[in-house]
Each structure stands twice: as structure tokens, then as C-alpha cells.
Amino acid sequence: MNILDEIIAHKRVEVVAKRSQLPLESVHAEALKAPVPPAFAQALRSVSMGLIAEVKHRSPSAGIIRTPFEPAQIAQCYERAGAQAVSVLMDEKFFGGGVDHFTAVRAAVNMPMLYKEFVVDEWQIWHARAIGASAVLLIAAVLSDQEILDLCACATNAGVEILLEVHDGEELSRALALGIDLIGINNRNLKTFETKLSHTLSLMSRVPESVTLISESGIRTHADIERLQAEGVSGVLVGEHLLRKPDLEIAVKDLMGR
């Protein structure tokens, strides 16, 4: 069992527990009362290269990433520096995230927010909408085509966008065949955790211009940004590189060339 399999196995048990603590009907009711969130893909495409800046405390591969870790202040730095959206990790066991981080960030910034979670159930979609998410991450590697379609339909009903993450050509083909128009290509090999920017570049020629394409992981320099932009990538998701810098605003501006 690799780390992703372990996370998903735990997540399925976790969601069952959460549904028993807070029934779907209650989450659904809260979602319907929540304010309409700002548009996610539109914000990314409003500039030549959109930035989804991530709020992440730790990861299985990197360990603790930033200390002290203050989610709201981190997000405010991102917003002041010109990020188009912010991603907040929801998983507590493996990434040190959680709903408290998300709600703290939601109260602190006006940007669109990505509910960065290992989604396996519609409860998570409605929960995302209830706490102010504009978009929800789905991971093609852990979902069947039918599960993706069902969760996308749920997201449409909930009023949130879906960012579908793919890791290889087969998953990209699946995403395009399903008509997904917001796709993230993760440059990290799930087996070795090695990251290669060339992974996005090798796959994106197959992606039509109508798709908002995001490159994720392994983006560290403004030269990386320029390379991706020149090839037509719409945006990037960056976390660890920024979070390890002492001054987050300067880090964002240096990365994006602003």
C-alpha cells in the first residue's frame, strides 16, 4: 500500500464518522445558507498566469514545512502579494490541516478558496460549500469515472467548481473524455515523490484551449513560470516553495515576477 492508498483508506473511515456526527442533511442546509463564493477559474484566467497559493502545515514527504504556522496571516500575505486564489489543506492526520484552518483563512481574505482534500463522498462537497469554498479538488487516481461524474454533478448542485487533478496521460485522457474544464497536472510522481516540471509540458499539448490548465508541484522560480506561461498553462499551484521563505509577500512577487 502506497501513501495515497493509505490516505484514502483512512479518509473513507473518517468521512463515515463525520457523517454520523454531522448528517448530510445538516451540511446541505448550511451550504444553502452560505454566501455565494467568488469564482475560481475565472479569477485564475483574469491574469496571464494565475497563482493558487497554498496553506499547508506539513506533508508525509516533507514533514513540517513552516513554523510558526498561522493560516490566516499566511493567506493575507498571499492576497497582498497578488495571488488569485488560496488552497487550504483539509486533511489533519497526514497534512496537519483541518476545518479550523480553512475557516480562519475564509474570514481573513476575499480570494476564491480551494478545498484541498481527498474527496471520496458527496458530504465533503457540501461541507466545502458550507464553509465558503469556491472549488473542490478531486483526484483522478483514486476515483472511477462514474465517481467523478457523480461528484461533479453534486458540485454543480452545491455551486462549487471542481479542479480535477491528474498525474499521467491515462488520467488526463479520462478527464478530457469526461468533459472536465478545470484540470490540474501534478508534476509529482506518486510512487517516488520526485517532481519534474517537464511532466506538465509533456502532457499539455493534448489539452484544448477551452480547458483551464493548472500545473502543480515543483514550481520554484520565475523562469519556471515563464516556461509554463509560454506553453499556454493558465495557472500554477504552489505551496512548499513559498512556505519555506521567510517573507511570503516577497516570495510570491519574486516567483510571479510582479
Image (tube, grey):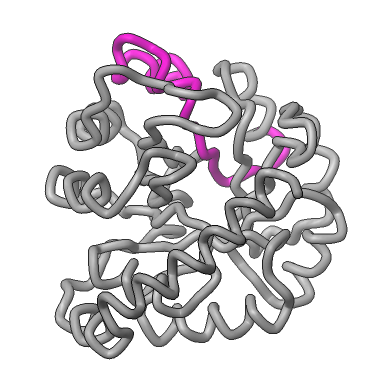
Q: Is residue 38 left or right of residue 209?
A: left
**Picture coordinates of residue 132, whole percent (x, y):** 24, 63
**Picture coordinates of residue 236, whole percent (x, y):** 54, 38
Q: Which residues are magenta?
A: 230-258
Q: Across the whole image, how many numbered discs are drawn on residues?
A: 0
User: Considering depth in this image, is 19 or 207 the residue closer to the camera?
Assistant: 19
User: Considering depth in this image, is 24 or 130 the residue closer to the camera?
Assistant: 24
- Most extreme residue toward the bottom is 25
Where's the C terminus, which quadrant? top left
| Residue at x 64% of width, y 22% of height | 224
Q: Is residue 174 left or right of residue 60?
A: right
| Residue at x 69% of width, y 26% of height | 227
| Residue at x 68% of width, y 54% of height | 5
**Picture coordinates of residue 237, whole percent (x, y):** 51, 39
Q: Is residue 49 above or below residue 112?
A: above
Q: Image quarter for residue 142?
A: bottom right
Q: Is residue 127 above or below residue 86?
A: below
| Residue at x 69% of width, y 84% of height | 146
Residue 227 among those drawn in magenta: no
User: Considering depth in this image, is 241 or 7 the residue closer to the camera?
Assistant: 7
Residue 239 among those drawn in magenta: yes
